[in-house]
Each structure stands twice: as structure tokens, then as C-alpha cells.
Image (cartoon, rainbow, N blue to C red):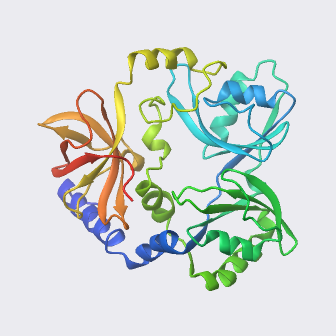
């Protein structure tokens, strides 16, 4: 496509400049979620797990305990291999005593992993993604908008709680949660047969609350979650939970895949850590791991100390921001760095 590397880099800089900081449409969508309410269609894969051993089986598969989840509640957790490296991060919903949903981006990979470890567990699982679509409703006025749509008031619904409800006699499941970092946010699960109706209701009713439909993938998957320190799998895959701050809440009394290796890491300490960074200037070209490859190297004094996993623009912080997985004994918050010739600073992972 490009004649040489310099032409390629120039074009990517121009695209970055237009698509992020200077794109008023993207800014409008981002700021709606932060200031009023934004809604968008974004369905993860769903795997339904059932059977009398379902809870015990998921306890084995996932780092955090699943068997102590109350019915209707959900938990974010990770799936490890035997070396305690993260293979996937998911949300597990307990819909009934022996019925769970696993929300993932990699359903086929997950079911193959379950096949490998099923053994004698009395459990069945199937991919049900085509049976449900999900609409995220996020932002300070999201509760007001959802309440204006549903039959049962959601004022008392707890975070990470999924409950049956109705919108114009259409059966839906409402989960309080989301991937934008907003304290108030909801997810509407509905049969694909009713999507047009739900979208029309969100658009029409949302006018009273200043709602904006978020249509840009960069906003829903990058700028919104990154500002609040949320991960993508590209940030954490093949790292271990201690390196990326996901070791809290582990029940060390239960068995889980990767436990022996993770105990050793706990004793010795992690060798890497996932930090945030900001650049001194905004119009830069930095290639992160989530766009393919290993990501640009992070340099200190000319020495590579890590790799960029994510890079975007934060519309609330008004900075170019990202994540980098760095050597724990060589780099820390506050250190000055150079990435692809651009200067910056290592920071906490939350920017707004």
C-alpha cells in the first residue's frame, strides 16, 4: 500500500490525528457516556454451563471462586493455564443454582479448554451467542433511561446483578455493569428477534435524557475503558494475575488450574507490571500490541524495559494515553520513557 516505511508512518500519524483528538463525532460519543448517557450494541460471546457439577467445574477453570456466587450475581475473573498465564478474562453470571453464563470474546477457545479439563464432572456447556444480543447503556443518566423503558424499577439493583425484566412485554435480562468505567451502567440482554424494537425505544426514549448512540468501535472498546484503567486481552494475555493487578479475591483454599505456579509467583514476586503512560505530545504514532505484533518497545536510557499493549486518546484527560507491560525492577510510576522516538511518563493506569 505504501512505498516505504516513512510513508506508512506519516499516513498512520495523519490517521491518528484525524480519528482521535480532532474527531468531533468521536468526542461527542465519548463525552455523552461521561456526562449524560450513551448506548451501543456490543454482544460478547456467551457460553451457558449447566449440570450438578457446574459450580465446582467453574471453580477449577477460573481463578476466583464461582461456587459462592449467589443466584443472579456475577463475577469478573480470569482463566489460567498450568503456568499461571492468563488465557482469557470473563464475567460469570449465576442465573440459577446449576446454570451459569460465561461472557467472553473467545467462546470456541473456551469450550475447547473446557473439553480438555471436563474429566468426570457432570456438566454440559454450549455456545448460545446467537440467542442473545446485548445493548450497553452507560453514563450518569443510564439508570433514568433504563427505568423509563423497563416494567420493573431497577433502583435497587446491585452492581453485577442480572435480573429478568420486560420492555414493552419483551422479555429481557438487565445486568448492572459495563466496560466503560462508569459507576452507573447497565446491559440489556434480549433475543435478536426484538433488536429493532429495543433500538427504536433506546433512540426515542433516550432523547429525554440527552442520550447518544455510540457507533464508533474505538470509543466503546478503547478510549472509554482505557481512561478508567480497564483491560483488553491484548494487555493481559500470557501475563500472570500478579503482573496485571488481578490477583485480589483469590480463594487459595480451592483448587484451580495454574494454582501451583501462581503460588510460586506469589512467593517470589512478579517480574513485570502493567502501568499506564502519557506522551508529551498528542500527534504521535505508537503501535500497541492490541493492533497486532508485540507493540512498540518502551525505552529508558536507550534500554528496552517493556512493550506497549494499548494506545489511544483520552477525551476527558485530554492526553494521549496507553498501557505498557514493563520490567518491575527497571521501571516505575514517574519514570521518563521514550516510545518510537516520542517522550512520555509512566503513570497509574487510571487517567480520568
Q: Is residue 224 left or right of residue 323?
A: right
- Seen at 27% across and 44% down, the residue is 296
In the image, residue 269 above or below residue 340: above
In this orientation, which residue lies closer to the viewer: 302 or 226? 226
- Seen at 30% across and 39% down, the residue is 307
In the image, residue 59 above or below residue 94: above
Q: Is residue 240 left or right of residue 273?
A: right
Q: Is residue 302 left or right of residue 93?
A: left
Residue 247 lies, in percent from the top left, at 51, 30
Q: Is residue 89 left or right of residue 326?
A: right
- Seen at 28% across and 69% down, the residue is 17
Residue 250 picture quarter: top right
Residue lying furthest left in this view?
301
In the image, residue 11 above or below residue 175: below
In this orientation, which residue lies closer to the viewer: 302 or 58? 58
Q: Quadrant of the N terminus?
A: bottom left
Q: Quadrant of the C terminus?
A: bottom left
Residue 275 lies, in percent from the top left, at 34, 42
Residue 223 lies, in percent from the top left, at 42, 61
User: How many marks can you see?
Assistant: 0
- Seen at 75% across and 31% down, the residue is 67
Amino acid at each position: 500500500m505504501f512505498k516505504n516505511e516513512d510513508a506508512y508512518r506519516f499516513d498512520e500519524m495523519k490517521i491518528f490525528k484525524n480519528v482521535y483528538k480532532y474527531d468531533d463525532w468521536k468526542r461527542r460519543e465519548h463525552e455523552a457516556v461521561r456526562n449524560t448517557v450513551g448506548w451501543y450494541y456490543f454482544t460478547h460471546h456467551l457460553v451457558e454451563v449447566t449440570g450438578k457439577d457446574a459450580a465446582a467445574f467453574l471453580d477449577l477453570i477460573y481463578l476466583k471462586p464461582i461456587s459462592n456466587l449467589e443466584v443472579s450475581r456475577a463475577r469478573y475473573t480470569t482463566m489460567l493455564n498450568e503456568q499461571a498465564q492468563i488465557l482469557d478474562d470473563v464475567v460469570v453470571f449465576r442465573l440459577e443454582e446449576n446454570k451459569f453464563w460465561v461472557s467472553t470474546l473467545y467462546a470456541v477457545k473456551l469450550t475447547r479448554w473446557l473439553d480438555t479439563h471436563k474429566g468426570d464432572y457432570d456438566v454440559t456447556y454450549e455456545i448460545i451467542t446467537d440467542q442473545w444480543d446485548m445493548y450497553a447503556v452507560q453514563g450518569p443518566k443510564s439508570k433514568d433511561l433504563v427505568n423509563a423503558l423497563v416494567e420493573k424499577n431497577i433502583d435497587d439493583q446491585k452492581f453485577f446483578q442480572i435480573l429478568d425484566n420486560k420492555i414493552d412485554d419483551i422479555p429481557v435480562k438487565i445486568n448492572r455493569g459495563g466496560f466503560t468505567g462508569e459507576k452507573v451502567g447497565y446491559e440489556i440482554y434480549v433475543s435478536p428477534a426484538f433488536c429493532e424494537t429495543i433500538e427504536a425505544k433506546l433512540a426515542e426514549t433516550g432523547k429525554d435524557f440527552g442520550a447518544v448512540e455510540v457507533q464508533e468501535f474505538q470509543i466503546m472498546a478503547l478510549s472509554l475503558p482505557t481512561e478508567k484503567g480497564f483491560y483488553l486481552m491484548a494487555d493481559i494475555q500470557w501475563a500472570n494475575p500478579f503482573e496485571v493487578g488481578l490477583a485480589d479475591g483469590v480463594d487459595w483454599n480451592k483448587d484451580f488450574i495454574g494454582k501451583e505456579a501462581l503460588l510460586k509467583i506469589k512467593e517470589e514476586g512478579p517480574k513485570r507490571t502493567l502501568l499506564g503512560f502519557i506522551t508529551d505530545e498528542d500527534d504521535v504514532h505508537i503501535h500497541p500490541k492490541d493492533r497486532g505484533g508485540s507493540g512498540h518497545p518502551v525505552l529508558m536510557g536507550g534500554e528496552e524495559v517493556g512493550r506497549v499493549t494499548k494506545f489511544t486518546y483520552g477525551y476527558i484527560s485530554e492526553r494521549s494515553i496507553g498501557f505498557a507491560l514493563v520490567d518491575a525492577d527497571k521501571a516505575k510510576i514517574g519514570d521518563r520513557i521514550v516510545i518510537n522516538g516520542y517522550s512520555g511518563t509512566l503513570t497509574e493506569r487510571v487517567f480520568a
